[in-house]
Amino acid sequence: MIANLEWLDDPTVFRVGKLPAHSDHTVYRSAAEATQKSSSLIKSLDGTWQFNFANTPKQRLLNFEQLDFSTEQFNEIQVPGHIELQNYGQIQYINTLYPWEGKTYRRPPYALGSDNTYPGIFSDADDNTVGQYVKTFTLPDNFTNQDVHIQFDGVEEAMYLWLNGQFVGYSEDSFSRAEFDLTPYLQVGENKLAVEVFKYSTAAFIEDQDMFRFSGIFRSVRLIAIPAVNVVDVHIKPVVSADLQHGDFSVALTLAGELADAHAQIVVNAPKGIVVLDKSVAANTTTTLAHEIFDEIQLWSHKQPNLYTLTVTIFDAKQQVVAVVPYEFGFRRLVKNDQNQVTLNNVPLHLNGVNRHEWSPTGGRNVSLAEMAADIQIFKDHHINAVRTSHYPNQVPWYGMCDEAGIYMMAETNLESHGSWQKMGAVEPSYNVPGSIPEWLDVVMDRAKSNFEQFKNHPSILFWSLGNESYTGDNIAAMDAYFKSMDDSRLTHYEGVFQNRVDEDRISDVESRMYAHPNEIAEYLANNPKKPYLNCEYMHSMGNSVGGFDEYVQLFDKFDTYLGGFIWDYIDQALYVTDEVTGQQVIRYGGDFDERHSDYEFSGNGIVFATRQPKPAIQEVSYYYGRYDNE
């Protein structure tokens, strides 16, 4: 297989050689490793990589991936990390417009007809910067004679991968894990890994989120040794009876490798550690254990986030342990009834939520575990019980943290095409994507599947969100149908049908709007509404704002079909820089980096500063959310 630069121009090519998405579990060699949460099957590749930066595709170094190519003149860069925050390229903050508007004419391929494909739109562009990464590694001794995969947790925006000069694969979707099989290309001793990252591809048309525009390998990278019998996927299905007393537990495992005479031991421990299930089943490619009934279950909710622990232990034909997979899950019952009332465990669902970009004032969207933990504590201190992963899948640890803390989640798919249908503030969808364009269907479906497959086992997720501000059409309807076909334990969300009601009966289980006045919400709910109401964005927290919050929370008392919503937003997007005059560290916002065009201080919408220091606004949020923090 040969890498093709023209894939950057083609929305129908978005994954080449990339393994299917699967659950976010970790495989350990032994029970002891699982207890210590340290797997000897994992080798981190985070740290210093060799790096070359090119301003355009034409200026990049050719054949840098080959074994005989000298990288002595390369610089160094830290992985994970954004290229632009390591003194390369241009930092730019922009909201709805595409970054190139006013400079370069571009239209999405196929959006103006099947003949309008625009060759070279990104592969031969003057504004498409390129990062060329090289990492050499030697496999640990315990990886010998095993298949080896590589996982990239986040690469923005389009990446090509080689090992020892051989092309391995290609991936877009900046915020979903990309996994590849390196086994055919490994060699004894030192191995050369090469990654070429392009800032833009056709993915840029559907990754037009309100954020700083970065590029590079900004999340962790690791090698995975694959055991002789591997747990490829875990799908847990906990169902709660209507009386909330009984749990119906099923689990489906996807296994691979030397399955003959192997078996899986499946153990479930209740929240206090008591074993409530212990069964052994033969190891097959698809291994299932279905409809195990647990009595007197402990439910998961915001106030009582009770988690059960599934442990899957794989024994080979010699009865030796070859793999252990622990996974925490919860029993909870989410229901939308015929009267459009939504309950969790038979209690009305009230969302005291915030939208949360992943953000660090030093790392941008490379957020540390400590910063995530600080966010959880701020949520708990201020009665915030829900979060929307605006507007893309977040780092894997965040989902487990929300499970443990009892934070309700709207898990958003990486899709926003704002600039293709809203032009200069007007709704103008003459060339919007993905719309109903056949050539854009597969790419958005792939993003929906990646979101679902990776995070399907987390009890904190109550809503699958199809994306943000991408208008409507057949392709988004197909995403909604997909989530419904795969998961009846959650609801779907999408706000864009408010812009065009033609699809409202086939997209989204909730009526969702942005920044509606409380009177507008009351009018909708008082007039035989089709759906329960949810504010995906409201109380725009910019400057001295969030006044009048009481008018929104009072809707909980007036309408049992009102779900609350998510404040825009949780944290300012701003960066530490060294002031040129004083030499001190200061915070700067959009427009402060000599970028044009920019949406300037519009990046500062948070109820906390980028440093996570609380703003005055959070006092009002805490007060009113506290009145409805008893469920």
Image (cartoon, grey):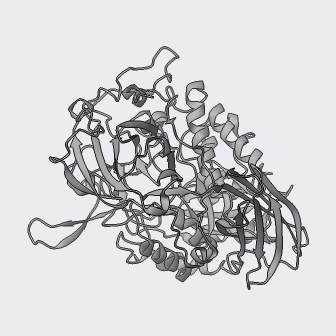
On the image, the x and y values in percent for residue 630 come to 70, 81
Q: Image check: 577 left or right of 278?
A: left
Query: How many marks can you see?
Result: 0
Residue 603 in which image quadrant: bottom left
Q: Image check: 52 left or right of 207?
A: left
Which residue appears farthest toward the top when viewing the image?
115
On the image, the x and y values in percent for residue 481 come to 73, 41
Query: What residue appears at the point 30 percent right and 39 percent down from the top-left corner?
Result: 65
Query: What residue appears at the point 80 percent right and 51 percent down from the top-left corner?
Result: 528
Which of these two is toward me, 399 or 283?
A: 283
Which of these two is toward me, 590 or 207?
A: 207
Q: Image check: 328 left or right of 124?
A: right
| Residue 539 visible in this rendered orientation of the protein | no
Residue 274 in which image quadrant: bottom right
On the image, the x and y values in percent for residue 445 come to 61, 38
- Compared with 628, 462 (above or below) is above
Q: Image check: 604 left or right of 617?
A: left
- Compared with 445, 318 (above or below) is below
